[in-house]
Image (cartoon, rainbow, N blue to C red):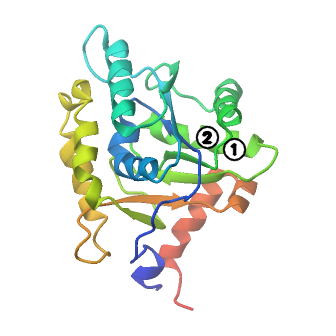
Amino acid sequence: MVSESQLIPYEVAELPVERGPWLVFAPHADDESFGMGGTITKAVQAGIAVHLVVLTDGALGGTSVDLVEIRKGEANKAATLLGIQKPVFLGFPDRSLHLDEKTVRRVYEEISRIQPAAVFFPGCFELHPDHRTTALLVWEALKMCPQKQIVPVSYEVLVQSPANTLVDISPFVAQKNAVMSVYESQLSENRYIDIAMSLNKLRSLTLRGDISHAEAFYCFSLSNLENEYEQVIFGTLKAYFSEQK
């Protein structure tokens, strides 16, 4: 079998993609902060413009009658703390994202509008169906782009997915906690901050001792866009059962 170092990095990268702008697709308002809030903070400090698109209205994430507006307000506040552009809210119904032509076209429109250097979407092993559908939607939209020059990058929200890039967020833990704390409507539903920080702590497993927290990403090659998303993911999983060459 291949060694651990062929499955996960033992060194950190400065950023997943060191040029901008970045376009982050979040299935729900909060996924961007729980998933990659530390890396966004680091990117903004490096001068990279970061744009956020929230796909669903988040209406099923709690019991408040005005939850949609509450979550929009939380996302706007989080964006201000992160130092990123004001979010765009597409408003698709929560838990009802579908891989269809209309939705792919809407995602493509946002990519065309921003013309990003990199596009971020949730990892393939995410549990929530909207998270997994977002990955498929973004992948199909990227395949529509005339020039395949936008780097596709997946990020982890609350579970581990395949990763080939680790970013040290140790200096930004306080900022990430502050941004996550904005999402009060969601923190009353679960211990999301503890869970996100535990995931980031776990991602420091293969890194040097002074790195306490890391966020994990999978940076796909541009040539991957020639294939279906599922095919590419299956290809990454084969590495876990490959013989050492």
Q: Position of residue 223 (x, y in %)?
A: 73, 61
Q: Are marks 1 and 2 in contact (CB under 8 Å)?
A: yes
Q: Residue furthest top?
A: 65
Quick one: label 2, few (<14), some, or many (20+) residues within 10 Å?
Answer: many
Give left or right: position of 235 versus 70: right
Instruction: Give whichever of 108, 227 is nearer the camera.
Output: 108
> Mark 1 highlights which residue?
142
User: For numbered disc 1, what is the local secondary structure?
Assistant: helix
Q: Is residue 189 above or below residue 37?
A: above
Q: Residue at x 38, y 20 (%)?
A: 72
Q: Which mark is residue 175?
A: none
Quadrant of the rendering where the C terminus is positioned = bottom right
Give left or right: position of 197 versus 220: left
User: For numbered disc 2, what is the local secondary structure?
Assistant: helix
Q: Residue furthest right?
A: 146
> Mark 2 highlights which residue?
138
Give left or right: position of 200 versus 22: left
Q: Residue furthest bottom?
A: 245
Q: Position of residue 98 (x, y in %)?
A: 58, 29
